[in-house]
């Protein structure tokens, strides 16, 4: 017969579409659809080549959202993602089409300004972005307020390649954060050394536990009637070999950002229980568990292991939490808190009165006590509102059968008012600053006797 021809046809439309999608995802952030770090690097290289040929300038603008991490902690990652999408749209609304905005990870964005790279123009753009991000966001029914810190570097003044300009803008952004946030800072040569110092500190923190550089200091919590110590709160300190004492407010956020908080949190629990087991009297020991640590660490297992290892009675341990642990997944958090209570451990609600809905959380879980935030105590004697708030908190706690502790007591006047209002326990610099527990064996009894030796003042109506 006649020769036959076989023709095979394939529709490549879907394949080509999939390949295009893969290429797009490789160069763009999946959440915001902005260029990613790789794409940014390419665009910045091209912009710098063009600027070198034309003798023009380029500005690199590094944006870091302020107060973003608490949004994740309080409302969950879905809300955090929604906030990032809305924030990226607001930033895009403030720049020109010829400029580039990229998301390079977490809550960090970088812009390349080629249409208006002069310092004064870059300042105007950066300031507009800060103002746009300062306006409240509505996320899942919540009103959320954040902000931004912005660093700017300029080609060719601050660097002639992409890496140098990115490092310079990053250093400027850190300076903006250190100086109070919500600001724009331009790069100065001294900033690079400061950024390197911060990165070095992050690396050193990773080995601080193994090198024995972390220690616990303790602050006594005393009975407001007798002045007798009832509890010691464990407070972590980092004794750096060359820098000396590094403040917790500096290295704890760093530990959370670097993923070190789980290991450090476990160390605090184990060390507090081990040291409390050797105390001459069965004082209680308390320690705080942050929302991020609460999510990342099996707190019940960590506490249970420490109790068994050191033979300490569960009733001597107080776990302090803030309401942030209840906001993302209240049911799961309450289940964990109930397990702690079932173990015989006491649970305290810290910073009471400062959060979103403290009263509603008292209905979800039966805390053993709550601690009045120091911001209220600080204003005692100066503000009638503070007096009214503390009176209400104390009465509420007692009506619910809870113990009430006042934090941040620094003056005799504050102490006298708190005793008259019926606060059960007192904590603050007036009684003692945090120190190694050995410092309190004799000195503390003498000091508290002097402060509390007279009769308790009549309760204020």
Image (cartoon, rainbow, N blue to C red):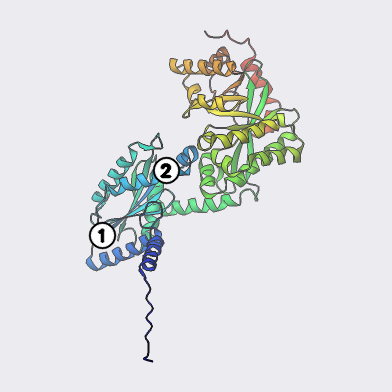
**Residue 57 - label:** 1
Q: In front here: 297 or 86? A: 86
Look at the numbered discs 1 and 2 and tell me whether their residues touch, using CB distance below 8 Å: no
x and y, in percent, of residue 118 in the image: 24, 54
Up/down of 60 relative to 224, above or below? below
What SS does tag 1 mark?
loop
CA gap, disc 1 and disc 2: 28 Å
**Residue 35 - label:** none
Q: Label 2: which residue?
A: 178
Is residue 373 visible from the viewing direction of this image? no
Toward which corner of the image does residue 238 lie, by quadrant?
Answer: top right
Residue drawn at (32%, 62%) of the image: 43
Toward which corner of the image does residue 56 lie, by quadrant?
Answer: bottom left
Is residue 368 visible from the viewing direction of this image? yes
The disc, 1 or 2, on the residue closer to the chain's N-terminal end is 1
Q: In front here: 22 or 315? A: 22
């Amino acid at each position: 017969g006649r020769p036959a021809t076989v023709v095979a046809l394939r529709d490549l439309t879907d394949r080509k579409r999939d390949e295009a999608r893969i290429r797009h995802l490789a160069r763009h952030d999946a959440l915001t659809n902005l260029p990613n770090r790789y794409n940014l690097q390419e665009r910045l290289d091209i912009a710098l080549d063009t600027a070198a040929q034309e003798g023009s300038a380029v500005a690199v603008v590094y944006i870091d959202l302020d107060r973003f991490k608490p949004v994740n902690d309080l409302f969950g990652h879905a809300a955090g993602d929604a906030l990032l999408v809305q924030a990226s749209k607001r930033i895009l609304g403030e720049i020109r089409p010829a400029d580039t905005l990229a998301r390079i990870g977490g809550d960090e964005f970088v812009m390349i300004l080629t249409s208006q790279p002069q310092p004064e123009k870059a300042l105007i753009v950066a300031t507009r972005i800060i103002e746009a991000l300062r306006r409240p966001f509505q996320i899942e029914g919540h009103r959320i307020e954040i902000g931004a810190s912005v660093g700017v570097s300029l080609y060719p003044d601050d660097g002639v390649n992409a890496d140098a300009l990115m490092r310079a803008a990053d250093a400027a952004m850190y300076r903006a954060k250190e100086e109070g946030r919500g600001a724009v800072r331009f790069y100065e040569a001294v900033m690079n050394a400061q950024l390197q110092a911060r990165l070095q500190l992050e690396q050193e923190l990773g080995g601080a536990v193994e090198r024995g550089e972390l220690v616990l200091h303790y602050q006594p919590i005393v009975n407001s009637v007798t002045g007798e110590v009832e509890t010691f709160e464990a407070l972590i300190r980092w004794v750096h070999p060359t820098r000396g004492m590094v403040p917790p407010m500096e290295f704890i956020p760093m530990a959370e950002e670097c993923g070190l908080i789980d290991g450090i949190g476990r160390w605090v629990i184990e060390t507090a229980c081990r040291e409390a087991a050797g105390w001459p009297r069965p004082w209680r020991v308390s320690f705080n568990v942050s929302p991020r640590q609460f999510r990342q660490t099996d707190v019940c297992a960590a506490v249970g292991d420490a109790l068994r290892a050191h033979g300490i009675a569960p009733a001597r341990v107080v776990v302090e939490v803030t309401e942030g642990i209840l906001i993302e997944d209240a049911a799961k958090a309450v289940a964990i808190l109930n397990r702690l209570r079932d173990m015989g451990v006491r649970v305290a609600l810290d910073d009471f009165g400062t959060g979103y809905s403290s009263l509603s959380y008292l209905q979800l879980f039966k805390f053993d006590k709550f601690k009045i935030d120091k911001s209220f105590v600080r204003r005692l004697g100066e503000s009638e509102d503070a007096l009214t708030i503390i009176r209400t908190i104390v009465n509420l706690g007692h009506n619910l059968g809870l113990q009430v502790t006042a934090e941040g007591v620094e003056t005799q006047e504050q102490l006298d008012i708190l005793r008259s209002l019926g606060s059960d326990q007192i904590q603050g610099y007036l009684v003692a600053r945090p120190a190694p527990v050995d410092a309190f064996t004799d000195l503390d009894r003498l000091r508290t006797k002097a402060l509390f030796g007279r009769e308790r003042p009549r309760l204020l109506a």
